[in-house]
Image (tube, rainbow, N blue to C red):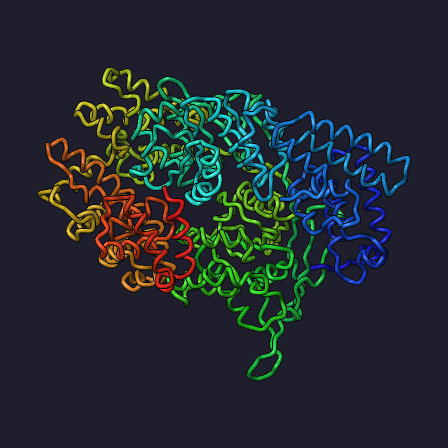
Amino acid sequence: MRQSTIDHAHIRERTDDYYVALVGELFERMHDASGDAAGWARLGNALAQLAGDEDGNGLQRIGISKSEATLFAAAAFYSGGFPASAYLTIRAGAPEQSDADVYRACFDLLARPNNMSSQVGHTLLNALRRGDMTTLAKIGEDATAQSALSLRVGPDAWIPARLFEQLIKRFLATNVRAVLPNGETEFWTPFVGSLLNRRPASWEFFPSQITAIQRGLLSRNETFSLQMPTGAGKTTLCETLLYWHANTTEHDVAVLLVPYRSLASELRSSMVRRLNALGINARCAYGGTIPTGNEVRDLNETRVVVATPEAISGLLAANQGFYSRISLVICDEGHLLDGVGRGVGLELLLARMRAREGGSPRFVFVSAIVPNIEEINAWLGGSADSVVRSDYRPALAEYSVLRPTGNGTRTSIALDMHPHEPSPTRYQIEAFLSQSDFEFVNSQTRRRNTYGFDSVKTQAIAAGRKALSMGTVAVFAANKRGDQGAIGLAEELVRQLGRPLTMPAPNDFINREKLAPVIQYLALEYGANWLGTRVVAAGAVLHHGDIPQETREILETQLREENIRFVICTTTLAEGVNLPIRTLVLYSVQRRQRNGSPENLLTRDIKNLVGRAGRAGATTKGLVICANQQQWGLVAQVARQSPGEPVRGALRLLVERLRQALVRRDAPLTNADIEAVPALHTLVDGIDATLVDLAAEEVGEDLLVAEAVRLADQTFASQQADAISRQVLRTIFELRAQRVIGIRAAGRLNWIRETGARLRMLDAVETGLLAQRATWDDVSDPLDPSVVSVFLEWAWGQVDFQKALRKAYRRAEDEDITGLQQPFFDTVNAWLMGSRFLHIVEVSGLNLDDLLSVHSHVVTYVLQTLVEQGVALLAKLLEGQGRTLAPAVLAFPEHLRFGVPTTIARVLMAGGIRHRSGAVEIGNALMRTGVSGENRHAVFESARLSLNQYTQAWREHLGTLVLENTASDLQTAT
């Protein structure tokens, strides 16, 4: 991408003058104590570009040390508050053997190596680890004195001394000990040690983190709300708060709410593991709505839970003692209050906690993109002084747009840099893409051909390829399916790579050794012909929400470790998973609806998306390329730092729609009406869960209805609504209170409390499921065909299921779907038998991509939820009749959740084995040797022994990736 414009050509012809000017600016900024963070970042990038220039006009030709230029670049980043960019930059250089100790100290402070090269570095690190602030202060005092003294000696002595003085001065203000309250004490030593032992080590906090801590996030026990850009250190800040909370309370619980299973899974292997290493009992819960035995095991000893809202709701119901111990709730990605699928449940969960008997826990609401965060903070009980805003980003983003001119093969596409800025900041890279990039020689005819490049899709993929030399590239599509979705982009990439074009290819930037086992895994699981497999074989990743979580985690690991550097993705990119993206190509920021009409992405959603370009410690800056110039206006709002749309909450929107529907009907609203509408079920379930908490036996009917009204008024939706909408919301809460009263009168309320099941499901289980078998205690196999058939037939008749099925299979509401029943049942049965997707697709009647959609949205979500609820309530109904439910039936939901046929495989999956195929095959093998699935310890010991004794046979059977990961999981399983 390097190209000199006419305006900038003189710089490359006069590198020495340019370098001297940059170094002069560096020391002038140091002298003036400049607080211009963006200016420091621009200076750092300019120096880093010169230091990394490898052409004939480089620094070495004019006698300038590359290590010196690299050091100056890193110092500029560090001085501006970009320690991650400083670390990344300094890794490109190293102190020379002849360098003085003060030079080495500068490198040590910026690079944070395992082994310090200077005595000062050794002393500083040891003092930081011990909390010896006196020694740190002495290093600063000595640096100032040495700088003044060296000024009298000459520039060769003064430059490194002055540089170190600048660096240590900032370090003394921003290091973790200096920022943490009472940071010098032994209280923080384990946590500081954890930070220092990471790679890269964390020695200091970002400006955004410092602001939050100084405002009292740790020291003030009150609700806070944090608006911090993506990548500004929210995760580390939350981890710090969780450590503080666990060590300043005796038995209290802190909950970190995360919206997606993918994010919970990532935190399980990072934050949760680190907290446990510090002696804090932490766990993740992100399975289903009814907690599993593993999730409730030792819950009384748990101090930190990372969970999705659905999972935490189940835990609250299952263990009232646990609920009462919660005193801190961190709500990450809080803007998802507006989420269509999750927003209503999240708001009602927070309202439920606010209304908890005995008092509300403390809330910390976190989001990168909520412009009206003060309103939400006030709703959660915070004050004006407990809102912390920051616009700090550890790696700045640059914006650009593709500008095509001409027609056909004469088309030339310029890259318009900083199009929202005035000249000279705005400039164009002419012919960024042109005919020469798409020409190739046909191997058969030997004639020169041109690959058609007039479509935005072709240009988007080509732009990503051109940017590969700078680092990881993500090409984003707002849709998943179709020619204009992520799948269409992936097909375009494969087509382009099928021609010998001269542009960089993703395969030129991969770690072949690391990627080979991944390709083998995908071929075994999905087949070599699946698009996702072919894309990885071509050096890229296809990433979207229908791909099973197990596989997404594998692909994300490859991206995170930069074994692969090209990803085509949907909004899954913005779901909190941290990936080192250097360039983000926005193919489209308009989502195609089912009727084909376009729908613009919200400004705040685009803002959240582009926040993924440029990650701390991975790149010093990010580049955003808008591929469709017709959509630049939508991206420009983000480039200009427009605040975006306020968050109002999905609950408010739902109430408004219900209000409009009620205007069109004469009859009053009833509970039957509410329970018959799938769109209202998240509302119903959230209300019911709270009222069940409040409906103690001594609470009278009138009081419970009054409490329901009070709870309705405490929702964020109510605080924004007008009188009519507020009354609609109150009416729904009143109706649900009456429903709870009826359940209580029937003596069944404790069933709901003890199981965490959804109250509205009670009638469906009692009238539809219970009678399907005369006896329920005579089942010995969880996958008994007669039992599986009963659950599938029952689920098929539920309105939630019907709606999800039609959407997944893309069938109209009035279309007959009877013909889908048997293929769907065959699909579920194949899943339960442990079949790989390569084989499930053969019985599904679908192509593989459609099968993955059905699996993701119906099998492992809607069906799983219905079965969990059904089994939990079925057990209570039978208990009420003096009957019992067979343990095998109680185990069925977990078999469905994991897709495994044996008890051993279920135990392995519940114990932390990440690969389903590994658990299935080990389960089958151990069962043949007589190992009992009822003995958990024997299962894991036998599995370890088998993998150790028959490693090569298992490698051939499972593939290298699954074998190695499973062996690792077995060593750490709990």
**Quarter of the figure with the N terminus:** bottom right
Task: Locate residue 189 relative to residue 167 in the image: left or right.
Answer: left
Question: Can residue 817 be seen at all in this image of the molecule?
Answer: no
Is 865 displayed left or right of 336 in the figure? left
Q: Quadrant of residue 724?
A: top left
Residue 539 is situated, as x and y percent measured from the top left of the image, at 53, 63
Vertical side of 868 occupied by 586: above or below:
below
Q: Nearer the viewer, residue 168 or 580?
A: 168
Quadrant where the image shows the C terminus: top left
- Image spot of residue 443 (x, y percent): 57, 81
Q: Residue furthest bottom?
A: 445
Q: Position of residue 185 (x, y in %)?
A: 58, 23
- In the rendered image, residue 960, in percent from the top left (x then y), is placed at 42, 60
Looking at the image, can residue 235 be seen? yes
Closest to the observer: 678 or 542?
Answer: 542
At x 53% / y 31%, what residue is drawn?
A: 190
Q: Is residue 965 above or below residue 202?
A: below
* Marker count (numbered): 0
- Using the rendered view, name the quadrant where residue 101 is placed: top right
Outermost residue, left side = 774
- Residues 854 and 210: in front is 210
